[in-house]
Image (spheres, rainbow, N blue to C red):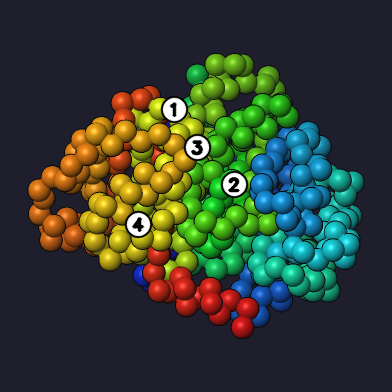
Amino acid sequence: MSGCENIPKSEKSDSPDLPPDHCAEAALPAGFQYAGVTCGIKPSGKPDLSLIVSDRPVVAAGVYTQNQIVAAPVILSRQRTPAETIRAVVTNSGNANACTGDQGLQDAAAMCQLVADLVGCQPEHVLVMSTGIIGKHLPMDCVRRGIREAYQQITPTLAGFLSSAEAIRTTDKDRKTVTAEIEVGQRQFLVAAMAKGAGMIAPNMATMLACMLTDAPLTTDMAQETLRQAAKTSFNRVSVDGHTSTNDTLLLMSSGEGTPLNANELQIFQQELTKVAIKLAKQLVADGEGARHLMAIRIEGAANEADAETIARTVAASPLVKTAVTGADPNWGRIVSAAGYADAEVVPEKTSLQICGITIYHHGAPVPFDEPALSNKMKSNPEVSIVLRVGQGPGTVEYWSSDLTTSYVEFNSEYTT
């Protein structure tokens, strides 16, 4: 698989350095057109209405938030996927349309109706996503104007794709995109994916909106299971602040025609699509509100995968672990003790820990190490690796989280005021 990640480095402030933009010549899957416009939802005047339109009915699958409080667009889109008749996805940013009652449902439906009228399809063939502040009704005059303007600007070009990705951002410092070419036997397929997310990030489904597009020929069942598996080891294994959103939506749309993938081809495709999902998921965490470091956590030796994931999630969510990484403090006691209170088996005498490749705790006992040198290594690396072995079992997972800075606290203490 060849891929690229679009991260405008010039827009970064104190966030971790990420790969530069290599998407200038990226190929996009055929059958889709894109647009992103400013319609006035955001007081900042930044882009806030995104539209993706397929040239014909396509297969679509979705995975959604597990929060019991869900936004109107989630209710609507969840009812419409999986399907093989989808024509468009409309997304607004700056307003979540969550906790907005019947009016919110009517507004989400109205967005789909207007897109359907423009595209020439039924409203149930349109999906909708929203992100932003909770509890406020959408300014529908702005939204309607934005949808019409976006439809006038739709284009199959990379510029259109990037403008669409730009318009779904809220507190994100960076546009988050990945494109990839996937080889499956003698066939080659393209994937183009976009996501947004920087705060309220926690499984299940990490807090974000994301849309993955491909020209691989998939049935609805294939698309739904492939997406579910991809989310399991990517978007469901990231955390910024432990807060699961009301709006999480991950979509997969396939414009592929011809013979659907066979079982072996599907397995390869699913593995490669998961790699794309992991790249996007890591971008979310690296761009976590106020983040300076991405914590790449690997748990080994757990009794099973479920236990490994439980331990990883517990370590990733610990404010003490997060702040230690912020301060480049190799405080192994915080990490080991966090694993110990997870609801999973840990074998103390078989527990070992590495930070940035340096062993500092082995088989239940501390190991002498150069603390200033390791601290400097943590400070200078945007990605801090934490490898924790908790026994001799087969359970292994990788998990990604951000550190915790005063910038995060200051930003979120003033979010609505």
Q: Position of residue 316 (x, y in %)?
A: 42, 51
Q: Secondary structure at mark 2?
A: loop
Q: Position of residue 386 (x, y in %)?
A: 30, 46
Q: Nearer the viewer, mark 3 or mark 4?
A: 4
Classify 10 Å Cα crowding around label 3: few (below 14), some (14-19), many (20 and above): some
Q: Amino acid at mark 4?
A: Val
Classify 10 Å Cα crowding around label 1: few (below 14), some (14-19), many (20 and above): some
Quarter holding the N terminus is top left
Q: Secondary structure at mark 4?
A: helix
Q: Secondary structure at mark 1?
A: loop
Q: Nearer the viewer, mark 4 or mark 2?
A: 4
Q: Is residue 206 above or below residue 97?
A: above
Q: Nearer the viewer, mark 3 or mark 1?
A: 1
Kindly indicate the quadrant of the structure image that contains residue 44: bottom right
Image point (20%, 35%), residue name: 363
Residue occupied by mark 2: 205
Left or right: residue 360 compared with residue 314: left
